[in-house]
Image (tube, helix red, strand yellow):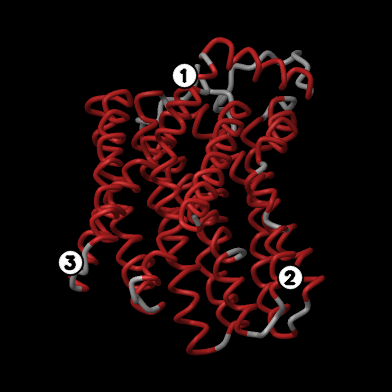
Amino acid sequence: MAYSGTEGGDSRKIRWFLFWGAFLSGVVLLGTMQTLSLMLTEKKVGATAISCVMLAAIPYSWKFLLSPFVKNVIVRRAERMRIIKGLAIISQLIVLAGLLSIGFCAEFCSVAPLYATVALTVTAISVHDIVRAYVKLKACDKQDLGVVTSIENIGFRLGMLVAGAGLLYIADAIGWRLAYIAISVPLLPALLSTVSLSRLETLRVGDEVKNEKFSLVHYVKACINFFRTKGIFLLALVMMSFKFADSCINGLKGMFLHSIGIGKLLFANISQVAGVFTMIIGGSFAGFLLTKIGSKKCAMFTFAFQCLASAIFIFLSSNKVSVATLTLLINVSTFIFGFSNVVFRTFIAEQSDGDVNIDSMLLSVGSAFRIFSCSIGGFIIDH
């Protein structure tokens, strides 16, 4: 049986591990993509070179390719918590070294070493995300998934805040190299939270058959069977309903606000500072509601809320409003997207039936919908 996420000190340790793991993921996401792109632009690195560096982040969206191998390492060992802890610590140390190295590479604008560093860092955090997902799916009861996903959402958003607005503020004061060193310091609690899992060595976190052979062929067959059982078209429709408005609006929000005269500092304050806390509140509310009414009803609320978010941006595109009104409306939509994100990830965790491979695959499909949504939105704008 899976461990119940509602019991005592073990529960707290697991939740701290999930929180700091998500925090680490948020730091890497912005620290190796959006903020890094801005840093390289400021240092007058060419757009082509910046695009090449951004390509190094591909492993973050392709975690489903890494998942079978990571799961294989875990389930083939008798003492799985020891393997989980080892994989997590190694990944965290690589991420820590990677962020420190990015700061030094930035000092000299060395694109080739920077590409290699970003690729290694993103691969390490992808492995860590898979390990974290395995722990969540196998160590928490189904009724607790909404709460623990909300906890992960808080950690992830705070990590984004540190590597987004926080990194920009620090870099403006003391420079990029020292800024990357500074944002690496809060990652140490992630190591401590992993070390604390050492007392859980006897915990059974999976019910997989020990002698079962986990291969790529097995993985592909499992995915095909999953879609056949769940109904691929219905599942695709539900996932698109979760992601389309959310991704399209978030992906194009910066462009839209710039078009109506909002400067980058005001955008940072509205979207990256106030927006992060609004998303945390929205995600926490979703976690509470999921435990009370379940994911199906929360999904229905999500789709209705996204209609409201879309209506807000239709209104903003047609009417000139004050900064205060703009901030209020933007953060209402941000609250909705924070709520939607936690409901979506809980829905995916429930649909995966405890299989980290299916969980990674569905999240990757969600990423594909996000990219597709942004592309459609950009096409509509251009035409």
Indicate the quadrant where residue 149 lies: top left
Which residue is at 74% across, 81% downward?
A: 109
Task: Confirm or deny contact between disc 2 and disc 3 (CB under 8 A).
Answer: no
Q: Which one is nearer the viewer's eye here, 261 or 156?
A: 261
Q: Residue furthest top?
A: 229
Q: Is residue 352 above or below residue 229?
A: below
* Residue on which the image places disc 1: 234
Tag 2: residue type? Thr
Q: Earlier in the sequence, mark 1 or mark 3?
A: 1
Secondary structure at badge 2 equals helix
Tag 3: residue type? Thr
Q: Position of residue 148 (x, y in %)?
A: 39, 38
Secondary structure at badge 3 equals helix
* Separation of residues labelled 2 and 3 (CA atoms): 38 Å
Q: Position of residue 96 (x, y in %)?
A: 64, 64
* Residue on which the image places disc 2: 48
Q: Earlier in the sequence, mark 2 or mark 1?
A: 2
Which residue is at 51% across, 44% downward?
A: 370
Q: Position of residue 12 (x, y in %)?
A: 39, 42
Secondary structure at badge 1 equals helix
* Separation of residues labelled 1 and 3 (CA atoms): 38 Å
Task: Confirm or deny contact between disc 1 and disc 3 (CB under 8 A).
Answer: no
Q: Residue furthest right?
A: 112
Q: Determine crowd level at label 2: few under 14, some 14-19, many 20+ residues with C-alpha closer than 10 A.
A: few
Q: Which one is nearer the viewer's eye here, 199 or 73?
A: 73
Q: Earlier in the sequence, mark 2 or mark 3?
A: 2
